Image: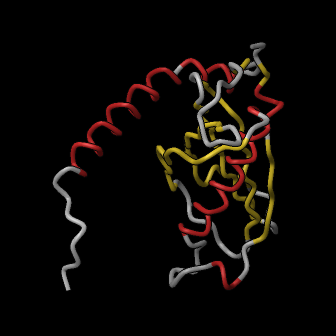
Amino acid sequence: MQAKPCRESRVVKTSRVFPNDVNDHNTLFGGKLMSDIDMTASISATRHSRASVVTASTDSVAFLEPIRPSDSVCLESFVTWTGRSSMEVFVKVTAEDLRSGERRIAATAFLTFVAVDDGGRTMQVPPVLPESDEERKLNASGDERAEHRRMHRAQSQEMAKYLTTSRPW
């Protein structure tokens, strides 16, 4: 398969923060942002694979700066690394104070998606071709993050063996 540039999977979504989007601290709900991150990242994965995708994991979400009602929120996502059927998607969240114009990185996230065919079987995805310095840096560290995901998944599977499904009430 021919490699695809990161730009072909790039998604940019900008929105405002409204009163129903904030918590008791008058900052954007983390869960609302996480939902937007997953939605944006899934579009990137679909653009890269041109197939149906499923979220395999949310590898990390780092909340770096609060997002306030006076801010706009810009999510930028793109595929940074691929395995055989998996795609790592990076999401950068930028908050912009709409009055002052000050912009800051408010959050970052890595998610993994798997491409599946109509029968639900995994399918091969093209490799990624990084072009910018940011893309190359993220791509170069992708193998390390993939290994960390494999170890974390194995630990989670081991832990699931002793978790119960009975109701405690």
- Residue 19 is situated, as x and y percent measured from the top left of the image, at 69, 85
Which one is in front, 43 or 10?
43
Which one is in front, 108 or 35?
35
- Residue 36 is situated, as x and y percent measured from the top left of the image, at 67, 60
The image quadrant where one finds the C terminus is bottom left
Residue 78, quarter of the rendered image: top right
The residue lying furthest to the top in this view is 2
Q: Is residue 94 toward the left or the right of residue 24 in the image?
A: right
- Residue 93 is situated, as x and y percent measured from the top left of the image, at 66, 51
Q: Residue at x 71, y 43 (%)?
A: 52
Its colouring scheme is secondary structure
Residue 26, quarter of the rendered image: bottom right
Which one is in front, 10 or 136?
10
Q: Residue at x 75, y 59 (%)?
A: 96
Vertical side of 16 occupied by 128: above or below: above
The image quadrant where one finds the N terminus is top right
Vertical side of 104 occupied by 33: above or below: below
Circle count: 0
- Residue 153 is situated, as x and y percent measured from the top left of the image, at 35, 39
The residue lying furthest to the front in this view is 119
Q: Residue at x 21, y 73 (%)?
A: 166
Which one is in front, 54 or 7?
54
Q: Is residue 68 toward the left or the right of residue 57 in the image?
A: right
Q: Is residue 61 toward the left or the right of residue 82 in the image?
A: left
Vertical side of 42 occupied by 137: above or below: above
Q: Residue at x 74, y 32 (%)?
A: 49
Vertical side of 147 occupied by 107: above or below: below
